[in-house]
Image (cartoon, rainbow, N blue to C red):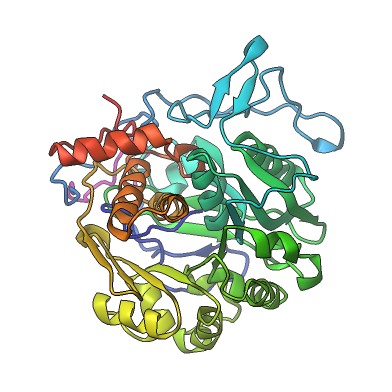
Amino acid sequence: MARSGGTPGAGRTDRSGRAEQPERPERSERSDRPEQSEQSERTGRPERTGHTGQRAHTDHTDHTGQFEQSERTEQTGRAGRPEQSDHGAQSGHTDPADHSQRTGAAGRVEPTGRTDPPGSADPYDLIAMGRLGVDLYPLRTGVPLERVETFGRFLGGSAANVAVAAARLGRRVALVSRTGGDPFGAYLHRELRRFGVDDRWVTPVEAYPTPLTFCEIFPPDDFPLYFYRRPGAPDLEIHPHELDLDAIGAARVFWMTGTGLSAEPSRTATLTALAHRARRGLTVFDLDWRSMLWPGATGAAPGEARPHYREALRYATVAVGNLAECEIATGEREPYAAARALLAAGVRVAVVKRGPEGVLALGADGTSADVPPVEVEVVNGLGAGDAFGGALCHGLLAGWGLERTVRYANAAGAVVAGRLACSSAMPTPAEVERALADHEAGERPSPQGARR
C-alpha cells in the first residue's frame, strides 16, 4: 500500500501509531467508529470537502467510470496458481483508468513499460528496493471496512508502486523484493511484468505469506490502513549476499525506503547496497516512516529509528518525505529547517512534501523550488506519494531543473489522488502533461486522471 505523500489532497495513513494486537492486523487508524448501515456513507458524519472545495466522492461506482461488479472467483490450475486467459492481463476487477497496457496482435495485452532479458547489459534507469504486497481496496468509498462487500485486488507496496510509476513513464525499471511462495506471490510477479517492471530479483520466502493490506476510503483525507504482515514480511527477508551489487551500483537511480531499515536482514542489505553505490549517480532515500511496521510491542519510537535513518542519509544523494517523516530523520518539522537538516546530513537534494501546502525542494547548490499543489477532486490519496516518487525519478533522470521536476511530480501525484487504485492508477506522460496544462489553465484535473 502506498503511503500518502505531499501531493494535495492525499490522505493520512498513520495517525495513531498503535501496535498490532494479537490476532489482529496492524492498522493505522482508530477503531472507535460507530457501526454504519450498509448503504450509508458514514451515518452522522458531516459531509466534508477537500481543499479544492469540491465534495468528496460518495457514489456507488469504483471512480474509474464503471459501477461495482460482483466478486468473481478466479479459477486456478495446478498448485493453486491462477490460470491466465489468452488476454493474459489480470483477473477480477480491472481499472478502466489503467493505461499500463495496450492491445496488440490477437488481442493480447502488452505492457507499455520495458522488461529486458537477463543478459541485457544496459544499466537500469531505476532499481527500487523495498515493500511489495497485495492491496485489497473497497470498490465503494465512504463505507467502513466491516460493511464492504466487494474489493479490488491490486499490486501494492511503496517501492513497488514507485517502480511501476517510473515504468509507466517509460523508464527501464527493476524491483528488489520478496513475496510468499503462494498464489498471491505469483499474482504479484504477473502484475510486475504486466507493468513493465523487471522481477528477476523478486524471490519467494516459503516461511511467510505474501503481505496483504486493506484500506478504508473516506475522501478527501481519511484513508485508514490495515497491514497483514505477520508472522513476518517476506520483503524484510532480503539478505546482503542475495543482492546483485553490480547492477545496483550501475543503476542510474537506486531507490530505498525507511521501512527497509526496520528489521534484519533487510536493514543490513539496504545499507550494503547504499555503501556499494558510494553516492554514485542518484541514490534516493524515501523516508517512508510507518511506526507499526517496525518491531516491538508498540512499534518503534522515533528515537529508535533515527540512528538508522542517519546512517542511510550518509549514502543518499536525494531524500524525500513528508513533514512527519522528515522529523523522524532529522528532528526538525518546520519545512525549511527539515530540508536544511537533510542537506547537512549529506544529501544533495532535499524534498519536503507538505500536503495541501505543496512541495519544498532545496539543492545543495543553492537551488530551490517552492511549488504549490495541483488541486484535484480526491478519491484516494494513498498512491499519490508513490506517483510523485516515480515522476521525481523521471525528472531527475531527464536532467530537468528542480522546479520543473517537482511540478511534474506534483501533477503525477494529483492524477493518482483522483483515482481509486495505486499501481494501476499511475499516469502516463500524456496524462501528467494534461494535468499540468489543466493546472496552468486554472482547471482541476478530472477524477479520470486529467482526461476530459
Expressed as whole percent of the image width and height from the top left, the position of residue 417 reads 34, 45
Expressed as whole percent of the image width and height from the top left, the position of residue 87 reads 66, 19
Left or right of 442: which side holds 61? right
- Residue 202, compared with residue 54, is above or below; it is below
Front-most of residues 102 and 158:
102
Expressed as whole percent of the image width and height from the top left, the position of residue 127 reads 62, 56
- Residue range in magenta is 36-47
Q: What secondary structure do most residues of the magenta stretch adopt?
A: loop
Quarter occupied by the C terminus: top left
Please report the residue visible at 20 percent of the width from the left and 56 percent of the height from the top: 372
Left or right of 406: which side holds 329? right
Instruction: Indicate the quadrant where residue 61 lies.
Output: top left
Front-most of residues 240 and 376:
240
Instruction: Indicate the quadrant where residue 84 lies.
Output: top right
Question: In the displayed image of the protein, which residue is found farthest to the right?
Answer: 78
Expressed as whole percent of the image width and height from the top left, the position of residue 220 reads 26, 49
Please report the residue visible at 52 percent of the width from the left and 50 percent of the height from the top: 161
Does the stretch in magenta take in 177?
no
- Residue 417, compared with residue 266, is above or below; it is above
- Residue 107, compared with residue 68, is above or below; it is above
Left or right of 172: which side holds 450? left
Does the stretch in magenta take in 38?
yes
- Residue 130 is at least partly visible in this image: yes
Front-most of residues 284 and 136:
284
Please report the residue visible at 64 percent of the width from the left and 38 percent of the height from the top: 191
- Residue 221, compared with residue 93, is above or below; it is below
- Residue 334 is at least partly visible in this image: no
Q: How many numbered dots are placed on residues in this image? A: 0
